[in-house]
Amino acid sequence: MNNDDRTTPGAPTPDAATGHGSIRLIEERCTSCMICVRECPTWCITIEAHSEVLPDEQGHHPSRQRVRTVHVLDEFTIDWALCMYCGICIEECPFDALEWAGPHVLGAADLVGLVHDRHALAEAGSR
Amino acid sequence: MNRHGDEIVQTTSEQWRDAVAAALAEGFSWFDSLIGIDEVGRPSGGDEEVRVVVRLVRHDPEGDPQGRQLHVRIPRELDQARLDSIGDLVAGAAWYERETHDMFGVSFTGGDDRPLLWHLDTPRHPLRKDELLAARLETPWPGAKDPDDDTAQASRRRTLPPGVPDPQLLDDPSVTPAELVASLGRARSRRARR
Ligand code: SF4
Ligand code: SF4
């Protein structure tokens, strides 16, 4: 699978012309902003995240009244049994942390097996 | 004209059938679609109305096809949401009239109002915006989580899932469809495309 031919970020690869198969999570870009979760029409994305105060001066600085925090992603799942490949999550992510990723996810023995976690989603399309 | 280049003709329920017949006579003989739009909560201000739209196309052998849309606004009240059937003018329209009856509760006089897609003992019209989406009310919404919940920055505003009304209004028998629809959780407005 060669992803380097793409001209538009997030555009389907040429060999995916018949449809979209899966979505990759680029975790370093994700800020756990919840936008994709709230925009997904089928409610198939879940996020577990917490916020942490930034270390030392960055978090507590005398010139600021509020502490500065950052979101830390603990889990990100997509339930492929519910996803309808509409691409709204990809379109709406302000940080380009989601992108189309090649062929369809493989079948699973049960529905739970179709819920992919952040590690599976990071690998999407690269098998 | 709308942005697709269609000619838009606003008509009334009295003139609706004649307007369709006139368009057919002018060569707009390819029937594309007939569907409703629930106007509740739309900026057009027609909280009491359903709009019915039929789209007809004239195929010009020399040039591009031209579309004409006939729009008619009728009362939303179920016993008044009624139009003359055009099923005898355009045979294929009868199917769409039945669908529009199922989905929007619009009746077509002289037409066929038997259920097409939606067979229930008590009629409900799922594309009316005040129709409650039971599964959405009962299923926990993954978007309700807030990663800031454990900090002082936690947002005070409770986010409702799109399509779910303010639960307080559900028990209030005097609530109007417009009030219910105004309380619906909404998707974020689309950001401008890059
Ligand atoms: S493609 Fe659509 S249905 Fe699938 S996860 Fe994204 S928003 Fe949800
Ligand atoms: S919209 Fe993008 S950045 Fe925000 S939570 Fe979803 S994947 Fe992460």
Image (cartoon, grey):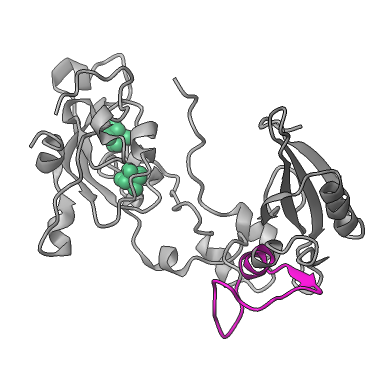
Residue A61, position as x, y percentages in the image: 24, 16
Horizontal relation, residue A84 to residue A13: left or right = right
Q: Residue furthest bottom?
A: B121
Relative to residue A125, is residue A11 depicted above or below? above
Please name the residue shown 31% across and 41% down the image. A19
Residue B150, position as x, y percentages in the image: 25, 43
The question of residue B120 being in magenta is answered with: yes
Label tally: 0
Whether residue B153 is visible, yes or no, is: no
Residue B90, position as x, y percentages in the image: 75, 60
Task: Classify the position of the N terminus of chain B by image quarter.
Answer: top right
The question of residue A9 being in magenta is answered with: no
Q: Which residues are magenta?
A: B96-124
Q: Quadrant of ligand 2?
A: top left
Q: Quadrant of residue A66?
A: top left
Horizontal relation, residue B83 to residue B182: left or right = right
Q: Quadrant of residue B169?
A: bottom right
Residue B160, position as x, y percentages in the image: 45, 52
Whether residue B85 is visible, yes or no, is: yes
Please name the residue shown 75% across and 63% down the image. B76
Task: Name the foreground residue: B178 vs A44.
Answer: A44
Task: Name the foreground residue: B177 vs B131.
Answer: B131
